[in-house]
Structures are given as C-alpha cells and as structure tokens.
C-alpha cells in the first residue's frame, strides 16, 4: 500500500470510528424491532444495508474482524429473507449474527471512550 | 493523456478514499458522483465520454447495475471499461452486473494493489482503442464497416447474454474468488469459417457472426448462461444450470434457429452456415485461473471439427495483456 493511501486511511480512521458509533446507536434501536411473528423484513433490510456499507470500509480502515462480522450478518439476513418459511432457529441464528456485529462495533466504540 | 475516470458511490468515505487512492496509483483525473442520478447528469453534461467508470452496486433509487446498463446504452460508451466496485459478492449480483455490461468486478474491501492492477488493465484497453482510432487513415471507411481479422474477437453489441471475451474471463475469475463455481464451459464453432470469412464482405461477416451469437444466446436464455465471441467464428459459453440440454440436442436447436434466420449474402445468395459443438467441462473443482484456461480448451475442442486447412482458433486465445487490449481495440465500436 502506498504511503499516500496509508496516510489517508489514518486520517479517515477517527471519522470512521465516529460513524461506527452512529451506526451502532441506530442499529441497537433497530435490533429491538424484528420479531418473527410480525413482519421483520423492513427492519432486517435496514440492518442489512448498514452492515453492507460497513463491509466496504471496515477492512481498509484496519477493522478486519468487524468487516467479517458485518459480512456474516449481511449473508445471514439475505438467507433469512430469501427463505419462504423461516423457522425460529434460522431467525435466532440471524439475530445472533447481528449481535456479533453489534458486539464488535461496541468494542471499537468502547476503546475510544 | 490521463484517463478520465468517473467514480460513483453513495458512501462519502469510499469516494474520499478513491479520490486519494486513484491519483496515487497514477490516475489523477477523477470525477465523483454520490448517486446514480448525479452520475447520469455528469455523463450527459460531459463534452467527451469518460474513459472508465467505477460503480458501486447498492445505491438508493437507481442501483449501480441499472446505471451500468444505462451507461452502456449511451453513445461513446459501448466499450468503455466499467468496473463494479462493490461488497455484493453473491453470484446473482455478479451475473446481473456482467449481463448489464460490466467489464470487471472488484469486491470490497479492495486493496490498492488489486485496484491498481484492474485500473492498469482498463488503461491499456483505452490506450489501444485510442491508438486504433488515431491510426485510421483520412477518408477511411467508418469503423462499423471495416472487416475484423478472422481470428480476432470483436465486440458484439446489444445481444442479450452475449458479453466480450475479456468480460467472460473476468466473470470466471470473480466466480472463482468467491468459490462460486458450479459452471459448465463449452464452445461452438462455425464450420468452414475461413471459407465463410473469405466469401463475406465486412458487414456480411460481422452481422453473420452477430446473428449466430444471438441464436446461441437465445437457446441458452433459460440456462443462466453467458456467450462470448472468441474470434474465428468460435463462441465460448458458460452456464450454471444442471438442466442444460444434452450437447446434441442443444446444438440441434441452435441449428434450427440459424435455419430460420435464412442467412444470405447481400446479393441474395443463401449463406450456408453450420455449427459444431465441443464437449462440456465442469468447473466445480477448478481454480479461477484454470477456469480461464478451460475457456481456451473449450474452443480447442470445438475447433477439432474444423477442416485441417483452417488455422486453429486456439491460436487467437492468449490471455496476455496484449491479447486483452486487442479485444477492445478492434474497430467495431458500438
């Protein structure tokens, strides 16, 4: 990686962490929303969009674990939404993947405090 | 002259990163758009077409795939390199992107070295195309009626499911990176292509090859497939469905479609065209690199049906930068 790009990434990193805090705040509220007996699609799609956008930047910013967990959460939501009759275990697995992603975001935010 | 690049991404931090990365990689002329609609306005207002476009896929209102299709339909953008830069790694998105006309597909998170490699390839394609355009002698026939070399692939525009050979190589490489191989690769060869080529004018040859590409693609329309012209009357195909008809049956259907076309020369004489097929190769356990080799092998197999006097089509398939540049430089601008 060129020193120019590395310097730019270093410059952007604090702003990325601020954006992670904002994403975490939004996602924690959304996380309370989806329930299998109501239609969880809209909420899950919103969570998925945030996870997707985070995948693209997390690794270049040095947060490889976060990128991987966001990618896992995104795939899990995709699978759940693609399923015609999602069962409770699939739903629980998706929530677990989302929680893992949120946990990693919280670790990053906490390290700034 | 620096390549003019349009970057489209709704994430301002990604745009910011690319605005830093691209100049540091030797591409200083970068224009950014934060939405597909903004990109459309920029393209419509541009005095000259951009030389390369980098598009995110997931954007609100108009997706990057829709934008890719729109750009391809614009005058001057028929062969412009379009790179999808996206975190959408699933095969359906990869398929949709290449079907819409993408040249290459870079999965986020991207690393600068990979981006540099892909951008360098895009630059070589543009340079070669510009060189060909500059070398046109004054008073030369319009690009669309110059005869391509027999063994050179040329760009077939506006036929659903037909993509350039370079795009197909990149498509297979992308599937390989994602471990998404469940594909069959096979090829068709126009029989007696040398004789047909010699007997055709530039337009007759171009439109005959295009018609046959369309006939093949039509018959593969329900089998999640792409077709690419590999030069010399050979067509390589990739399909992902296990329900593909047997080789003989599929070839017979395509022959029927060609017969219905009633191909003929400009003076009305009927054009005798037959199509041969080669065996299929499954890509399930192969690497991305060997998948590209399989493309060449598929053409070689189909080429075995050619008369001995015909130059082997395989000679035209060299995955070198020069070869790739040649693909895009041929005078068949859409």
Image (tube, coloured by chain):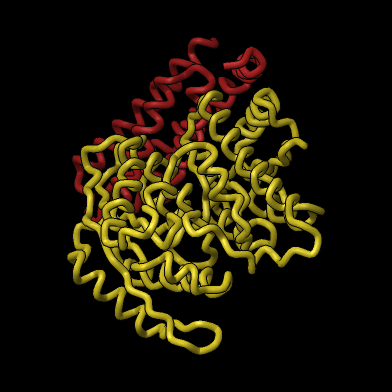
Q: Residue at x 37, y 44 (%)?
A: B172
Q: Residue at x 65, y 56 (%)?
A: B77
The N terminus of chain B is located in which quarter?
top right
Q: Answer whether residue B85 is visible to the viewer in this image.
A: yes
| Residue situated furthest front in the rendering | B309
Q: Specify whether B316 is left or right of A77.
A: right
Q: Answer whether residue A76 is visible to the viewer in this image.
A: no
Does residue B77 lie above or below B144 as drawn? above
Q: Specify whether B267 is left or right of B245.
A: right
Q: Nearer the viewer, residue A76 or B89?
A: B89
Q: Nearer the viewer, residue B332 or A101?
A: B332
Q: Nearer the viewer, residue A72 or B72?
A: B72
Q: Specify whether B308 is left or right of B320.
A: left
Quarter of the view holding residue B16: top right
**Which chain gets the red colouring?**
A
Does residue B218 lie above or below A3 as drawn? below
Q: Specify whether B47 is left or right of A85.
A: right
Q: Residue at x 79, y 55 (%)?
A: B45
**Which chain gets the yellow colouring?**
B
Does residue B144 lie above or below A64 as drawn? below
Q: Residue at x 33, y 38 (%)?
A: B176
Q: Nearer the viewer, residue B117 or B202?
A: B202
Image spot of residue A27 (x, y percent): 46, 34
Image spot of residue B83 (x, y percent): 55, 43
Image spot of residue B144 (x, y percent): 64, 67
């Amino acid at each position: 990686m060129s020193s120019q790009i590395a310097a730019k990434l270093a410059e952007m990193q604090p702003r990325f962490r601020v954006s992670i805090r904002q994403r975490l705040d939004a996602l924690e509220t959304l996380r309370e929303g989806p329930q299998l007996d109501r239609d969880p699609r809209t909420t899950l799609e919103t969570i998925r969009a945030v996870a997707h956008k985070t995948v693209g930047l997390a690794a270049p910013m040095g947060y490889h674990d976060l990128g991987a967990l966001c990618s896992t959460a995104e795939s899990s939501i995709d699978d759940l939404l693609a399923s015609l009759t999602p069962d409770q275990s699939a739903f629980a697995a998706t929530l677990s993947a989302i929680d893992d992603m949120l946990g990693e975001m919280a670790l990053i935010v906490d390290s700034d405090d | 002259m620096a390549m003019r690049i349009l970057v489209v991404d709704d994430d301002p931090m990604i745009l910011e990163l690319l605005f830093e990365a691209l100049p540091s990689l030797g591409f200083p002329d970068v224009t950014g758009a934060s939405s597909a609609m903004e990109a459309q306005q920029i393209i419509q207002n541009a005095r000259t077409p951009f030389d390369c476009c980098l598009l995110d896929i997931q954007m609100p209102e108009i997706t990057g795939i829709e934008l890719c299709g729109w750009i391809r339909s614009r005058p001057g953008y028929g062969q412009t390199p379009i790179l999808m830069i996206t975190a959408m790694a699933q095969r359906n998105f990869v398929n949709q992107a290449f079907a819409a006309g993408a040249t290459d597909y870079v999965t986020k998170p991207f690393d600068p070295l990979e981006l540099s490699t892909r951008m360098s390839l895009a630059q070589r394609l543009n340079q070669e195309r510009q060189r060909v355009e500059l070398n046109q002698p004054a008073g030369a026939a319009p690009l669309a009626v110059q005869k391509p070399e027999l063994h050179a692939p040329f760009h077939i525009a506006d036929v659903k499911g037909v993509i350039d050979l370079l795009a197909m190589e990149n498509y297979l490489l992308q599937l390989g990176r994602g471990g998404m191989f469940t594909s069959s690769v096979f090829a068709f060869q126009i029989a007696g292509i040398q004789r047909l080529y010699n007997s055709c004018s530039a337009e007759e040859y171009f439109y005959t090859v295009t018609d046959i590409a369309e006939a093949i693609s039509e018959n593969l329309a329900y089998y999640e497939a792409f077709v690419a012209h590999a030069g010399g009357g050979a067509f390589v195909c990739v399909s992902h469905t296990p329900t593909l008809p047997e080789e003989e049956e599929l070839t017979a259907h395509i022959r029927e479609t060609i017969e219905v076309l009633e191909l003929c020369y400009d003076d009305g004489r009927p054009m005798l065209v037959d199509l041969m097929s080669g065996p299929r190769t499954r890509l399930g356990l192969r690497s991305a690199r060997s998948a590209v080799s399989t493309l060449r092998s598929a053409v070689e197999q189909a080429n075995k049906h050619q008369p001995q006097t015909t130059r082997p089509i395989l000679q035209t398939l060299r995955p070198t930068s020069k070869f790739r540049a040649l693909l895009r430089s041929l005078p068949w601008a859409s």
